[in-house]
Image: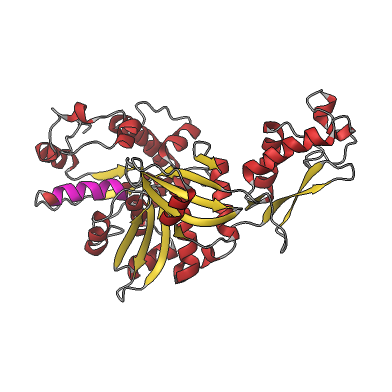
């Protein structure tokens, strides 16, 4: 028997802006839509004696069970997760998100992030997976019973109390000790991943967890800085990998024999401050390529084309001629200093303004004379016109190379962050 049921559902609350932007569904569209209890009977009927197939089935099944539980009904179905099946049957994909996966397989998808479009794409994906599972053994193994792999009552209670906000979260054992610290742009979603994960680490977390506390930051940058500092301070036993250094390569500046500023990419030195730090050599090299173009610098002096007498850009008349000593050092080094000032902390005082914990609030990250001082939150109605006022609001944090790396990396990836130099 083949049937379908498509309906919007009135959640009886305002739709958050990011959800409206993602799905195209706003609160006004749902005013006349049925409430969940009005469609509950139809859902039960259409799924009777069926297996629920979904992309990340744990999430969809948990939502259904939660809504039915509120109505006093125990909803139980077997499930198959097409994420798990895809990883088994189609290994090596760059991403297993529904959109990227189906596109890579040539499966057409319409109405992305709407239930009907995603459901049809999942159906076509599942049909492909059934074809690949010639022995049917993997499909059977992933046909989950009600009790296998689902959230128990303890984990469900913890999860339902958590908000979908940006911040830092702390996992506690039954003695109240913190054994893991993390950050996320959506704390509830991230904790759900911990609770439904199949790795050895996830299983240990699910067994040890007694409570989750959190601190809202609004700003992802603030969350990254707080996570890094508190892991080093509290040293939770499940954060061993994050105690290690975040970066291994740096870009260092020096004067060449003709007086031009140049750079080299090296492993981090014990002495000296790099202009910028990177986790991998390729990240550093890609950054130098882009900076060379953005600030009209010489490829040879920036280490991109070191073996040539003159750089490739000079040969095609896109270089001002520093590599051939045709541009004076003063003009070239001024552009280089602009590049260096844009990315390095050395002797710079600035405030980075980012999102706050509400629409009326902003966060501030203070750097003075190249030293990271800490973070603060301030209200939009309260204008910060003097540095002394900001210093009073700042919560001090340790100025470490890790903190600088986090800030520099975030600035490079987020062009919209507001930078005020004073």
Count the marks: how many? 0
Relative to residue 279, is residue 3 depicted above or below?
A: above
Front-most of residues 60 and 245: 245
The colour scheme of the drawn protein is secondary structure
Q: In the displayed structure, does residue 95 sit left or right of residue 138?
A: right
Q: Quadrant of the C terminus?
A: top right
Residue 286 lies in magenta, yes or no?
no
Specify the principal SS of the magenta part: helix
Q: Which residues are magenta?
A: 58-69
Relative to residue 137, is residue 34 depicted above or below?
A: above
* Residue at 36% from the left image edge and 30% from the top image edge: 112
* Residue at 74% from the left image edge and 36% from the top image edge: 334
Relative to residue 403, is residue 47 depicted above or below?
A: above
Residue placed furthest toward the bottom: 175
Relative to residue 13, is residue 174 depicted above or below?
A: below
Front-most of residues 102 and 216: 216
Residue 138 location in percent, x, y?
A: 40, 51
Residue placed furthest toward the top: 317
Residue 369 location in percent, x, y?
A: 61, 53
Residue 233 location in percent, x, y?
A: 48, 69
Residue 88: tell me if it is visible.
Answer: no
In which quadrant of the rendered view does residue 206 lie? bottom left
Front-most of residues 253 and 49: 253
* Residue at 22% from the left image edge and 60% from the top image edge: 157
Residue 270: tell me if it is visible.
Answer: yes
Q: Quadrant of the N terminus?
A: top left
Q: In the displayed structure, does residue 342 sit left or right of residue 113?
A: right
Residue 56 location in percent, x, y?
A: 35, 46
Residue 65 lies in magenta, yes or no?
yes
């Amino acid at each position: 028997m083949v049937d379908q049921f498509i309906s919007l559902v009135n959640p009886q609350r305002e739709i958050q802006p990011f959800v409206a932007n993602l799905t195209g569904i706003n609160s006004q569209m749902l005013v006349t839509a049925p409430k969940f209890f009005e469609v509950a009977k139809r859902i039960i009927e259409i799924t009777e004696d069926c297996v629920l197939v979904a992309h990340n089935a744990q999430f969809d099944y948990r939502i259904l069970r939660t809504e039915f539980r509120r109505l006093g009904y125990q909803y139980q179905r077997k499930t198959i997760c097409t994420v798990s099946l895809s990883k088994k049957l189609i290994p090596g994909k760059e991403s297993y998100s529904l959109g990227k996966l189906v596109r890579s397989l040539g499966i057409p998808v319409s109405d992305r992030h709407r239930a009907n479009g995603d459901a049809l794409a999942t159906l076509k994906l599942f049909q492909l997976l059934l074809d690949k599972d010639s022995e049917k053994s993997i499909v059977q193994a992933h046909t989950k019973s009600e009790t296998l792999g689902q959230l128990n009552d303890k984990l469900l209670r913890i999860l339902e109390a958590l908000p979908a906000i940006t911040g830092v979260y702390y996992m506690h054992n039954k003695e109240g000790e913190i054994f893991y610290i993390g950050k996320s742009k959506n704390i509830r979603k991230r904790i759900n991943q911990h609770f439904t994960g199949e790795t050895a680490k996830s299983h240990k977390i699910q067994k040890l967890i007694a409570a989750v506390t959190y601190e809202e930051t609004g700003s992802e940058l603030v969350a990254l800085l707080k996570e890094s500092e508190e892991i080093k301070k509290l040293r939770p036993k499940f954060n061993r990998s994050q105690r290690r250094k975040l970066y291994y390569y740096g870009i260092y500046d020096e004067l060449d024999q003709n007086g031009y500023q140049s750079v080299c990419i090296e492993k981090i030195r014990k002495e000296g401050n790099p202009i910028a730090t990177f986790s991998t050599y390729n990240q550093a090299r890609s950054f130098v390529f882009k900076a060379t173009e953005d600030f009209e610098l010489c490829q040879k002096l920036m280490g991109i084309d070191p073996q040539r007498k003159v750089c490739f850009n000079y040969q095609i008349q896109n270089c001002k001629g520093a590599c051939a000593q045709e541009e004076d050092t003063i003009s070239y080094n001024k552009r280089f200093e602009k590049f260096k000032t844009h990315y390095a902390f050395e002797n710079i005082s600035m405030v980075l303004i980012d999102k706050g914990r509400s629409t009326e609030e902003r966060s501030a990250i203070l750097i003075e004379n190249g030293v990271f001082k800490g973070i603060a939150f301030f209200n939009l109605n309260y204008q910060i016109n003097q540095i002394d006022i900001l210093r009073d609001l700042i919560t001090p944090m340790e100025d470490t190379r890790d903190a600088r790396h986090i800030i520099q990396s975030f600035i490079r990836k987020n062009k919209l962050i507001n930078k005020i130099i004073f």
